[in-house]
Amino acid sequence: MPRILMTGAAGGIGTSLRKLLPPIYPDLVLSDLKAPADLGSHETFKAADLSDLAEVEAICEGVDGILHFGGYSIEGAWDDILQANIIGGYNLFEAARRKGVKRIVFASSNHAVGFYPRHHRIGNDVTPRPDGRYGVSKVFGEAVGSLYADKHGLKVTCIRIGNFGERPLDHRRLAMWLKPEDLVQLCQIGLEHPDIRFEIFYGASLNERTWWDNHHAYDFGYRPTGRAEDFRDHAMAEQAKIPPDPIGDYYQGGAFCSIEYDGDRSRIIDWNND
Ligand code: 15L
């Protein structure tokens, strides 16, 4: 029975996966800065600060595979991103190498490519176009994963997660929703598929409006079950409550793109006329 470490166990994704993973991986070790408030007596928890290499090494001891959801999960101040995602991300891969962990599933994000316009369909091989410091940290994590796969033979799966949750929240999320059970499927592929080397998948369910060519995940057997359009009325009603955002509504990364934006707005009109 493989021992699986899940970082970020107290976060949004971690909280949901704590309930879905145990039937598949009963030997699950949870980690975060602090234990989740509702930690059960049947759950194993080890605290660690990702920016401290010794602490990360300690949680990697005896582990076969890692689901790395830890770190800073939205746009933020440089020092927060630096500590949690840049230093923390490096520490995670390095600690895994030192402790002989075989596989890592890295929670990357759509924000690694958020500055692609929505009318541009992209595959997993496009040049990154991060939409903030957070997006840059996800590109960095993917790069470290690639290095550790090539140089040290780790089997690394990067999942560019769209928006994880029970249902799509608005118009943008109809194109990039990820149902929790579909993320579990992608994690299982990353932890078990014999042909994994270094892979990038999009973390998206069966979304008719998708901007992403995710055939690489399908080639590995991914068969998502969540249908975003089943929630269309709810998502559109929520969208109607949100003010228009000329920058965010144009790019895939949404509001992450308009934060601090002082770029060339005329490019948006030009591209619209393509
Ligand atoms: C992400 O990467 C974030 O972690 C999440 O909080 C959402 O903002 C999501 O992207 C999104 O783009 O909706």
Image: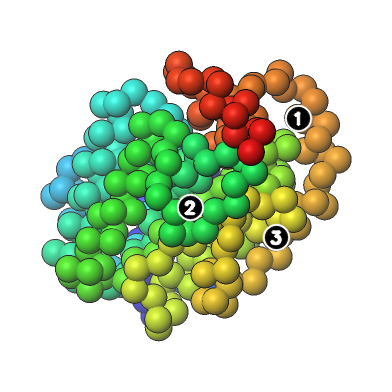
Residue under pointer 3:
206
Vertical position of residue 44 compared to residue 215: above or below: above
Evaluate whether residue 16 shows in this view. Answer: no
Going 24% across and 35% down the picture, which residue do you hit? 83
Q: Would you call the spot at circle 3 few (<14 residues within 10 Å), some (14-19), or many (20 or more)?
A: many
Residue under pointer 1:
239
What amino acid is labelled 3 in the image?
A: Leu
What amino acid is labelled 2 in the image?
A: Arg
Number of marks in picture: 3
- Of labels 3 and 1, earlier in sequence is 3
Vertical position of residue 168 compared to residue 30: above or below: above
User: Residue 160, labelled with which disc?
Assistant: 2
- Of labels 2 and 3, earlier in sequence is 2
Mark 3 CB lies closer than 8 A to ligand 1: no
- Of labels 2 and 1, earlier in sequence is 2
Q: In this rendering, would 135 be left or right of 161?
A: left
Nearest to the observer: residue 187 or residue 229:
229
Colour pattern = rainbow
Evaluate whether residue 221 shows in this view. Answer: yes
Give the residue at the far right of this rendering. Answer: 233
